[in-house]
Amino acid sequence: MDVITLYHLNMHKFSHIRHIFFDLDNTLWDFSANSHRILYEMYQAFDLQEMGIHAFDSFHDQYRMRNSHLWSEYKLGNKTREEVRLERFQHTLYDHGIDNRLMAMRLADYYIENTRRVKDLVPGAVELLEELSAKYPLHIITNGFEEVQDFKLVNTGLRKYFRSITTAESAGQLKPGKKIFEHAMRQAGAEASESLYIGDSPDADGHGSMNAGMSFIWFNYKKEQNTHRFNCAVTELKAIGAML
């Protein structure tokens, strides 16, 4: 189903909306592009090729796999934030035959410090926020680490668009848990029946927000098949403005 069809089917569904909540990573802030950039800089800065990691793509792909697994464990409560930060690099080094905890700590610190400064946004993000902020109070709900997410918003100039920022740390629960969405709505002074959530993750964003009673628009930038049967999905942010 194309964007135009979705528009005609769904524009009437959002007439009741009074508050709009956004995910941050890969919805507004281009996490994939920014993370790739920092990892490449890291690969060069720490001369990882000389340590035995002969191809950046191998380093990048193993890191993504390890990071994804550790975040899954973090969501289940099996890993702490500090363990995720360190072990994603420690395990990536192990995968390349390198047992060096000190180097893993240095890589972990470099990644956190430098992720804050990169500014690539998803195409259409600023234009959409300019349009919607003139009509609605806007808010953020994010699983990302609190201090990093705040820097991202400030450094990209996005902070000014949002009335409230809810992180998993401040809410005491990660998405897709119901509690984080309810916490965000209380903080915003919003009712679930008048709240819309926009995000890229079918589970964390889609099922999580809908379980909390919110409306949802799936930002399907990967153009995946809509097996989740969400009522509204777009592949470009610019399509959202016309619906609201």
Image (cartoon, rainbow, N blue to C red):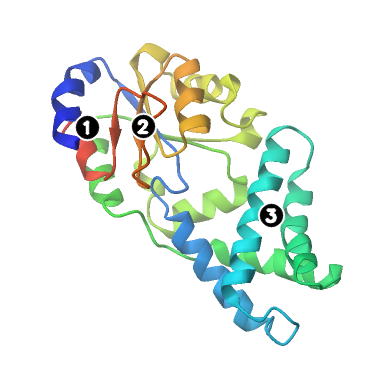
Nearer to me, 161 or 42: 42
Identity of the residue furthest to the bottom in this view: 50
Q: Name the amino acid type tagged 3.
A: Arg
Residue at the image position 65 percent from the left and 61 percent from the top: 63
Which of pointers 3 and 2 indicates the residue nearer the eye? 2
Which is more N-terminal, label 2 or label 3?
3
Specify the label residue 203 is tagged with: none
Separation (CA) of disc 1 from disc 3: 34 Å
Q: Which quarter of the figure has residue 129?
A: top left
Q: Name the amino acid type tagged 2.
A: Asn
**Which residue carries the number 3 mark?**
66
The N terminus, quarter of image: top left
Rate crowding at label 2 as few (under 14), some (14 to 19) or many (20 or more) other CA atoms within 10 Å. Answer: some
Q: Which quarter of the figure has residue 13?
A: top left
Separation (CA) of disc 2 from disc 1: 9 Å
| Residue 112 visible in the displayed image | no
**Which residue carries the number 2 mark?**
226
Q: Position of residue 188 (x, y in %)?
A: 44, 24
Q: Position of residue 19 (x, y in %)?
A: 34, 24
**Which residue carries the number 1 mark?**
1
SS state under label 2: loop
Which is more N-terminal, label 1 or label 2?
1
Nearer to me, 225 or 146: 225
Q: Position of residue 206 (x, y in %)?
A: 45, 28
SS state under label 3: helix
Q: Is residue 62 above or below residue 202?
A: below
Question: Badges 2 and 1: C-beta atoms under 8 Å apart?
Answer: yes
